[in-house]
């Protein structure tokens, strides 16, 4: 990471973000479905596909790991809840920690990979597969600004360029700074589209700090956004996890910000 990243890593109050394969999360020594609430168990049981249940469970465990690291408490001491402001139901929607109202959390999952973030400031995170089948460009005109659309259309890899903008905008939605209907009015065209393969990319949008990175091993693009500069932490590999495990561990300063697979 750059010297700027090292400075952010030293901030004990910086929001934390992590990404990992769902199976790696569930194999972690501190992981287990005992961490979930009864409502989370019921929601997980409603998934028709086992893969969906696994991703849901892993994301809800990883977000606890991030919050536990932020607070310096055991993951099994944290209760995660959700609330949807549109329908007022509590089996989906924005996640939060009822016992820690000063902590903000966010989570995301795609096929076999999950991401999570926790911070003392509002935070949003999104992860998407870079190998998704089918073109995503058919929705570009509805979610991109004219300037963003021009950048995507002239980019050597338009699908990847669109995906980078998409994960950023999804993170903004989870942060509460954008809505799905208004994504085309959010113009991120001034931000670089190409993210280095070996380190996270930091950028600014208005008063927000964006952190973008890729996970070549998992084939995903990740974006985290907050009013404070987030930092990447990695899930300790199960085979190397100490006893008791530190979950997740801080990413090495000179290594790619990747979750062990």
Image: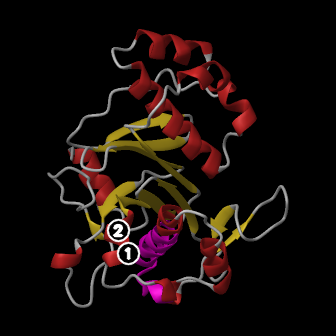
Q: Can residue 97 be seen in this view?
A: no
* Residue to which mark 2 is pinned: 23
SS category of the residue bearing label 1: helix
**Which residue occupies the foreground of this view, 30 or 188?**
30
Residue 206 in the image: above or below residue 248: above
Q: Position of residue 213 (x, y in %)?
A: 34, 43
Q: In this view, does 255 lie above or below 75?
A: above
Q: Where does residue 140 sit, x and y in percent of width and height?
A: 58, 22
Q: Is residue 61 above or below residue 118?
A: below
Q: Are marks 2 and 1 in contact (CB under 8 Å)?
A: yes
Q: Position of residue 163 (x, y in %)?
A: 46, 32
Residue 61 part of the magenta segment: yes
Q: What stretch is highlighted in magenta?
A: 57-76
Image point (32%, 43%), residue name: 214
| Nearest the eye: 217 or 74 | 217
Task: Name the disc covering residue 26, or none.
Answer: 1
SS class of the residue under badge 2? Answer: helix
């Amino acid at each position: 990471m750059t010297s700027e990243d090292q400075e952010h890593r030293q901030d004990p109050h910086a929001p934390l973000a992590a990404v990992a394969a769902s199976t790696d999360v569930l194999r972690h020594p501190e992981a287990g479905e005992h961490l979930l609430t009864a409502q989370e168990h019921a929601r997980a049981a409603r998934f028709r596909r086992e893969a969906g249940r696994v991703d849901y469970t892993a994301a809800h465990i990883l977000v606890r790991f991030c919050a536990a690291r932020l607070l310096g408490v055991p993951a099994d001491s944290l209760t995660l809840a959700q609330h949807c402001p549109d329908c007022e139901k509590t089996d989906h929607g924005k996640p939060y920690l009822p016992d820690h109202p000063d902590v903000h959390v966010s989570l995301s999952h795609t096929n076999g990979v999950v991401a999570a973030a926790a911070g003392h400031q509002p935070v949003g995170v999104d992860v998407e597969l870079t190998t998704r089948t089918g073109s995503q460009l058919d929705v570009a005109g509805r979610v991109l600004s004219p300037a963003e659309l021009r950048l995507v259309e002239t980019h050597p890899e338009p699908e990847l360029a669109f995906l980078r903008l998409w994960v950023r905008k999804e993170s903004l939605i989870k942060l509460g700074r954008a809505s799905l209907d208004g994504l085309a009015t959010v113009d991120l065209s001034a931000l670089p589209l190409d993210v280095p393969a070996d380190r996270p990319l930091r950028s600014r949008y208005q008063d927000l700090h964006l952190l973008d990175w890729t996970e070549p091993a998992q084939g995903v693009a990740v974006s985290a956004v907050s009013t404070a500069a987030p930092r990447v932490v990695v899930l300790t590999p199960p085979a190397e996890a100490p006893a008791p495990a530190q979950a997740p561990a801080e990413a090495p300063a000179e290594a790619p910000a990747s979750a062990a697979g």
